[in-house]
Image (cartoon, helix red, strand yellow):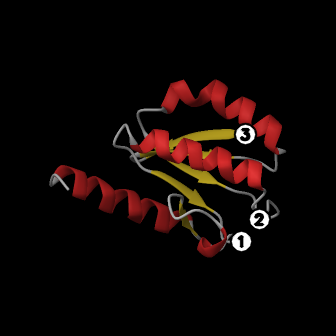
Amino acid sequence: MKFEIKDTAVIVDQNKQVSSEFFKLFDLNYPKFHLNNIILIIDETKNSEPDFVNFILKLTKSHQLHKKTFVVVAPQWSQSDISDDIICVPTLQEAFDLIEMDEMQRDLGF
């Protein structure tokens, strides 16, 4: 798993790790960047396994309580296959655009 701070977000690249390894590493490192917006890049070979999607859903909900954005970049996922609570976009640029819009809305009090 790789972490990179870029602009207003932390980019987390899961590097083809199996779910159990990913869960452990993410939980271990989350306190380091929990106050930042997070972009999680999902490897193209990763399908939407229920355990993995449920973990992402839990993270998304808890992260949004801190008024920060959690975006998943997964071009292979269809929004109809996952929860509406998970923000999923196909490209990294769209993730940054979405974070920028969210930050503007928060600044305006929405």
Q: Which label's residue is closer to the chain start, 3 or 1?
A: 3
| CA distance for labels 2 and 1 | 6 Å
Which numbered dot is residue 88?
none
Q: Amino acid at mark 1?
A: Gln
For the residues bearing labels 2 and 1, Cβ distance under 8 angstroms: yes
Q: Which label's residue is closer to the chain start, 2 or 3?
A: 3
Q: Amino acid at mark 3?
A: Met
Label 3 CA crowd tier, 10 Å (few <14, some 14–19, many 20+): few
> Image quarter for residue 100?
bottom left
| CA distance for labels 3 and 1 | 19 Å
Indicate the secondary structure of the residue bearing disc 1: loop
Query: Which quadrant of the rendered structure holds the C terminus?
Result: bottom left
Residue bearing mark 3: 1
Residue bearing mark 2: 44
For the point 31% across and 62% down, the residue is 101
Q: Amino acid at mark 2?
A: Glu
Task: Find residue 106 and report its horizontal and vertical position in percent.
Answer: 23, 51
Residue bearing mark 1: 76
For the point 61% across and 27% down, the residue is 29
For the residues bearing labels 2 and 3, Cβ distance under 8 angstroms: no
Indicate the secondary structure of the residue bearing disc 2: loop
Task: Find residue 26 and report its horizontal and vertical position in percent.
Answer: 66, 34
| CA distance for labels 2 and 3 | 15 Å
Query: Depth check: 10 or 80 in front?
Result: 80
For the residues bearing labels 3 and 1, Cβ distance under 8 angstroms: no
Task: Find residue 96 and report its horizontal and vertical position in percent.
Answer: 44, 60
Indicate the secondary structure of the residue bearing disc 3: loop
Nearer to us: label 3 or label 1: 1
For the point 61% across and 75% down, the residue is 80
Say left or right for 70 vs 58. left
Q: Which label's residue is closer to the chain start, 2 or 1?
A: 2
